[in-house]
Amino acid sequence: MSKSSRDQIDKDEKKILSELVKNSNEKIETIAKHCGFSRQKTWRFIKQLETKGLIWGYTAIFNEEKIGRMHFILMVKRTTKQIEEKTVDKIVSRKLEDLVAELGITIESSSYVHGEYDWVLTFTAQDIKQAKKFSDSLVVLHPGVIEKITIMQTLMFIRKHYILNPEKMKLKEFL
């Protein structure tokens, strides 16, 4: 395959990814039309992107407030001491999933990051008390590993998962 063919495939993949970011629930025909491709080509590219692991999920964006939930960001700074192998295994085994199920927490994202903090989670809970209980449970689940936890409540999303909030005028309440 020539370099120009590979370049064109990369451009086509990026076009399709861009359209999926705007609305992954859109019909294949609409995505194809926006990209200038046939329905078959678009479907084939999407399947290839899924197979390659470039797409590993689809989701709906919802308003937490309207379903009786609050959105939080939790940032974790770990201690500088070496983490024991059994603790690493516990983290990798995703014991956290059992904990959130018990507490009624829904984790939106979980990221290991570089910076002042080491781990950032975004999640929904019924209220700040439930979010604090989750925070305290993390310390118990990973004893001696966590130096500091900061919880922030999201007041309003301006943009979420690449999508602008349609209720933009609500921002005036906070400014």
Image (tube, helix red, strand yellow):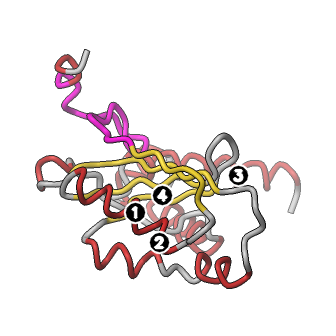
Q: Amino acid at mark 1?
A: Asp
Q: Nearer the viewer, residue 78 or 96?
A: 78
At x 31%, y 62%, the residue is: 133
22 vs 50: above or below: above
**Could you tell whether 44 is left or right of 174 in the image?**
right
First of labels 4, 1 by sequence position? 4
Report, in whole angstroms, how far the alpha carbon at label 3 lies from the one at label 1. Answer: 45 Å
First of labels 3, 1 by sequence position? 3
* Dot 3 and dot 2 residues touching (CB under 8 Å): no
**Could you tell whether 141 is left or right of 49 in the image?**
left
Q: Amino acid at mark 3?
A: Asp
Report, in whole angstroms, how far the alpha carbon at label 4 lies from the one at label 2. Answer: 54 Å
**Could you tell whether 103 is left or right of 90 in the image?**
left
Residue depth check, mark 4 versus mark 1: number of the one nearer the observer: 1
- Residue 10: give its label: 3
Report, in whole angstroms, how far the alpha carbon at label 3 lies from the one at label 2. Answer: 46 Å
- SS of the residue at dot 3? helix
- SS of the residue at dot 4? loop
- SS of the residue at dot 1? helix
Expressed as whole percent of the image width and height from the top left, the position of residue 143 reads: 56, 71
Q: Nearer the viewer, residue 166 or 121?
A: 121
Q: Which residues are magenta?
A: 152-170
First of labels 3, 2 by sequence position? 3
Report, in whole angstroms, how far the alpha carbon at label 3 lies from the one at label 4. Answer: 17 Å
Expressed as whole percent of the image width and height from the top left, the position of residue 30 reads: 35, 51
At x 40%, y 59%, the residue is: 135
Quadrant in the picture for the C terminus? top left
Residue depth check, mark 3 versus mark 4: number of the one nearer the observer: 3
